[in-house]
Every structure is written in structure tokens, then in C-alpha cells.
């Protein structure tokens, strides 16, 4: 599957670039099963999407804390603020997937402008990018605070295009989330599916323009 090289590549952050696996240990330390991470993350997205659907929004961190507090209470675990903060602080200490650094370096060398766009807070990933040495490769690190709508709402992608001063059709979005690909495609971007989990792309969503296993494969296809 081929794709044309965009002027700007928009990168999703959570799970696409960052590895959330270490968060499981924090959930376990708080008294929850490690797989509660998956339920928590899915529920945070659900509530963020629900607020966006009614044309409003809330901070990722606030929603994340609400969901985690509910999980702890349901499990009969102390849900004090310290416990919640201890778990959620792990989001600022994540690492990149191993393929991200070589892939982004090669894309940058090929002249592709790189920006991030997350439903979380852009500041949360700064240490991760700094530690990996890729912060200078990122022209912009954007979140959805200013547009006030979470991806996959069109306003989030339009905001990225406005900041980057390029038409939507000169941009592509790379993400592991089909809902993000679908939203980007509907807004006019190319959509590139990073199939880390080797799972079929849902037929109910707009098909991606490109499917690759990771960012090294993506860079190899685009940079030649």
C-alpha cells in the first residue's frame, strides 16, 4: 500500500509513540490488576469523546483522575488523592517505543515536518522526547486545549493545520488508533495506520492510506 509524502506528518502520542506498558506496575501498586490500565485508558477516551460529541471538552488529566478514582472505589481500594496522583504521575515518565527514534530521525532527514497532536497535555510528553533526543525533531507539540475538541473531531486537525500553515491535504496523521485515522481522513488528511498490535483495521472506519508495522517501516517506505 503506497502513500504520497506529505509536507507535515502529525503524530499521535499515547500508545502510538509512547509505551504505556510500565503503567501496569503503577496500577498494581495501587491495588488494582495490571490490566486495569486498558480499561482505564479506554474509559478516559470514551468520556473525552462523549464530551466532544456534545460540543464541549475537559482536561485529559481531570477525566483520567475521575476514572481512576472510580476504579479504585469499585475495587474497595483507598481512592485518596495521593493514590491517584501516584498512578497518573507515571504518564510523565513513559518511554518511546524502540522504533520511534530511528523512524523519526529518518523522516526528518527526508524533509518531512514532524508535529505531535495529543488529546492529553503536550507538556506531559516533554521529558520522554527530551530523554530520547528527538525533541529538536518536533516542529510543534500540540494538544487539543485550544480547539477545545478532542480528536477525532475535525476541529483538532484543523487546528494543527492552522498552526503549521499548510492545507489539510498536505498533511498526514500516523496513529495506532483507527478512530484517529478515521477522523483525520474525514478532515482531509492522509491516514497512516501504525499496526503495532497486528490487528485488522475495522471495516466500519474509513480505510487508511497506508498500513505499516512501525515507524521504521514507515520511514523506509517514505524516505526510500
Image (cartoon, grey):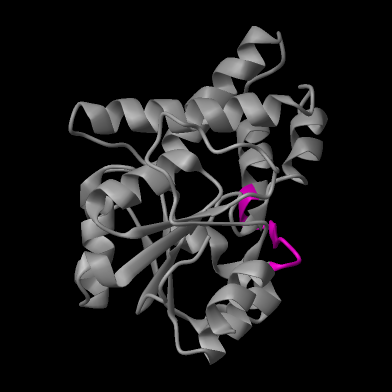
Residue at 37% from the left image edge and 75% from the top image edge: 6
Identify which residue, 111 or 69, lies in the foreground: 111
Residue at 23% from the left image edge and 61% from the top image edge: 159
Residue at 70% from the left image edge and 43% from the top image edge: 198
Evaluate whether residue 148 shows in this view. no
Magenta region includes residue 203: no
Apparent side of residue 169 relative to residue 117 in the rendered image (left or right): left
Apparent side of residue 146 relative to residue 196 in the rendered image (left or right): left
Residue at 63% from the left image edge and 49% from the top image edge: 195
For the image, the number of numbered tags is 0
Which quadrant would residue 17 be assigned to in this image?
bottom right
Q: Quadrant of the C terminus?
A: bottom right
| Residue 97: image location, x then y, percent | 72, 61
| Residue 64: image location, x then y, percent | 51, 34
Residue positioned most to the front: 1
Q: Which residues are magenta?
A: 91-99
Evaluate whether residue 187 shows in this view. yes
Residue 49 to residue 5: above or below: above
| Residue 49: image location, x then y, percent | 35, 31
Apparent side of residue 215 relative to residue 26 in the rendered image (left or right): left
Identify which residue, 39 or 85, lies in the foreground: 39
| Residue 29: image location, x then y, percent | 82, 32
Which quadrant would residue 151 be assigned to in this image?
top left
Residue 86 to residue 110: above or below: above
Amino acid at each position: 500500500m503506497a502513500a504520497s509524502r506529505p509536507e507535515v506528518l502529525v503524530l499521535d502520542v499515547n500508545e502510538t509513540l509512547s509505551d504505556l506498558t510500565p503503567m501496569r506496575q503503577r496500577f498494581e501498586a495501587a491495588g488494582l490488576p495490571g490490566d486495569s490500565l486498558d480499561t482505564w485508558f479506554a474509559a478516559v477516551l470514551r468520556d473525552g469523546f462523549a464530551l466532544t460529541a456534545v460540543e464541549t471538552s475537559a482536561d485529559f488529566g481531570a477525566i483520567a483522575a475521575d476514572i481512576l478514582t472510580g476504579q479504585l472505589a469499585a475495587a474497595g481500594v483507598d481512592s485518596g488523592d495521593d493514590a491517584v496522583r501516584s498512578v497518573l504521575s507515571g504518564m510523565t515518565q513513559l518511554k518511546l517505543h524502540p522504533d520511534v527514534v530511528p523512524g523519526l530521525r529518518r523522516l526528518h532527514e527526508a524533509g518531512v515536518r514532524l508535529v505531535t497532536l495529543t488529546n492529553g497535555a503536550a507538556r506531559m510528553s516533554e521529558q520522554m522526547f527530551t530523554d530520547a533526543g528527538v525533541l529538536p525533531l518536533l516542529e510543534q507539540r500540540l494538544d487539543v486545549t485550544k480547539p477545545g475538541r478532542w480528536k477525532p473531531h475535525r476541529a483538532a486537525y484543523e487546528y494543527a493545520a492552522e498552526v503549521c500553515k499548510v492545507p489539510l491535504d498536505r498533511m498526514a496523521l500516523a496513529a495506532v488508533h483507527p478512530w484517529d485515522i478515521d477522523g483525520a481522513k474525514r478532515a482531509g488528511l492522509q491516514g497512516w495506520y501504525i499496526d503495532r498490535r497486528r490487528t485488522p483495521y475495522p471495516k466500519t472506519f474509513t480505510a487508511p492510506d497506508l498500513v505499516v508495522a512501525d515507524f521504521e517501516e514507515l520511514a523506509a517506505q517514505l524516505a526510500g
